[in-house]
Image: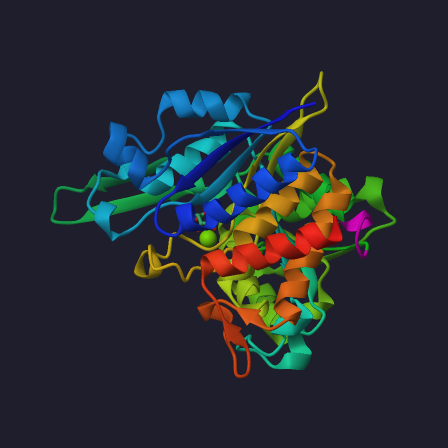
Amino acid sequence: MTHKLLLLAGDGIGPEAMAEVKKLIAVMNENGASFVTEEGLVGGCAYDAHGAAISDADMAKATAADAVLFGAVGGPKWDGVPYDVRPEAGLLRLRKDLELFANLRPAICYPALASSSSLKQDVIEGLDILILRELTGGVYFGEPKQITDLGNGQKRAVDTQVYDTYEIERIAAMAFELARTRNNHVTSMEKRNVMKSGVLWNEVVTATHKAYSDVKLDHMLADAGGMQLVRWPKQFDVIVTDNLFGDMLSDVAAMLTGSLGMLPSASLGAPDAKTGKRKALYEPVHGSAPDIAGKGIANPIAMIASFAMCLRYSFDMVVEADRLEAAIAAVLADGLRTKDIMSDGMREVGTVEMGDAIIAKYREAA
Ligand code: IPM
Ligand code: MG
C-alpha cells in the first residue's frame, strides 16, 4: 500500500529541516517502504508565488494526501502583507479546513539534554509529558474577529473565545484515550474563574470523564498550570487545554526539553466514518527562525521527530517510529549537538550532519 505524503516546507528554516526528512523517506523507500511524495507551497513563499498563504490547488493536494508534513511559515519579509494572506493564515486554513482539532505536543527530555535546559537538571530529567491542544476552535477562529473604528479617535479590537460542547467533548475523549496508553492521568486547564468558556470546558471535561473513570482527572487553572509546568513538570502526564492556552503552554513545555528545536507535533482529525483514517498534519513546534535561515545550523530534530509521529499515528509503523526516535536519542548520546542545544564538551554540527547522523543510526538498527 502506498502512503501519500504532501510536503509543505514553507519558509525560513522549514526547507532545511524538511530536506533531512526527504533523505530519510528516500532511505525508507529503498528499504521497502512505499511513500509517494508531492510538494506544495505554504506561507510567505506561497504569497510570493500566488498572492495567498496557500493556494486552493495545494489545499486540494492536502485533502487528498494521507498525511501532510509541514515545516514552518513566516518571516520579516512578509510583516507588511495584508492580514488575510499573512503566512500564518496558510497554516490556520490547513488546520481548519482539514478539521485537525487535536494537536499532540509531546515534551520529552532526552537524557543527553537534561543539562541544556534553563531549568535544573532534576526538574526535567526523564520528563515525558503530552500537551493536547484543541486546534480548530476558541479565540483563534471565533467570530466576531475585527477592529472597528469608533469614530472618536479610538478603535476597538475584538477576538471571540467560543467553544461548543461537542468541541470540548471530542478533545477530552482524545485526552483520556491517550492517557490510557501512557500514565493514565489527565490534567485539564482552563480559566473557569474568569471565563465562561472555562466554566463550560470544566463541566464538559468532567462529564466526558464518566466514560473513562479508570483515568485520573485533575483540573487546574491555566495560569497556575503554567507555573506548575516550570516548578515540577513531572507531576503531569497528559495536559488538555484550549487553543490559546495550548499555544502558550506548549512553548513553555518546549524549554523543558532543552530547546524549541526539539518539539514535534501531530495535528489529527476525527477518524473517517468509512475508512477509519484520520486526516493529519505533522509539524515541528519551532517557527521559521528567519534569523538563522539558510545558514545550515537549524536543528532538524523536531522535524524528524514529527515524521516519527507521522509513522506512528498515520501509518501504524510503530517499529519504524520507535527506531527513529531511538536513533535521535542515540545521536544525542554520542554528543552531537546543533547550535541551539550545544553545551561544553559536545560536538557542534550543522543541519545536514545532524540529519545524516540520525539516518545512519536508523539504518544501523534496521
Ligand atoms: C504554533 C504557532 C502557530 C499558532 C502560529 C504560527 C499561527 O505558534 O503552532 O504554536 O499560534 O498556533
Ligand atoms: Mg505557538
Q: Position of residue 127 (x, y in %)?
A: 69, 67
On screen, residue 49 versus residue 247, left or right, reads left
Quarter location, residue 112: bottom right
Farthest residue, direction top: 274
Q: Which residues are magenta?
A: 179-183
Q: Residue at x 68, y 26 (%)?
A: 277
Is residue 181 a member of the stretch shown in magenta?
yes
Q: Residue at x 63, y 55 (%)?
A: 360
**Front residue of this view, candidates 30 and 278:** 30
Q: Residue at x 50, y 74 (%)?
A: 342
The answer to whether residue 133 is above or below residue 317 is below
Visible in this render: residue 180? yes
Quarter location, residue 83: top left
Q: Quadrant of the N terminus?
A: top right
Q: Position of residue 301 (x, y in %)?
A: 55, 57
How is the protein colored in the picture?
rainbow
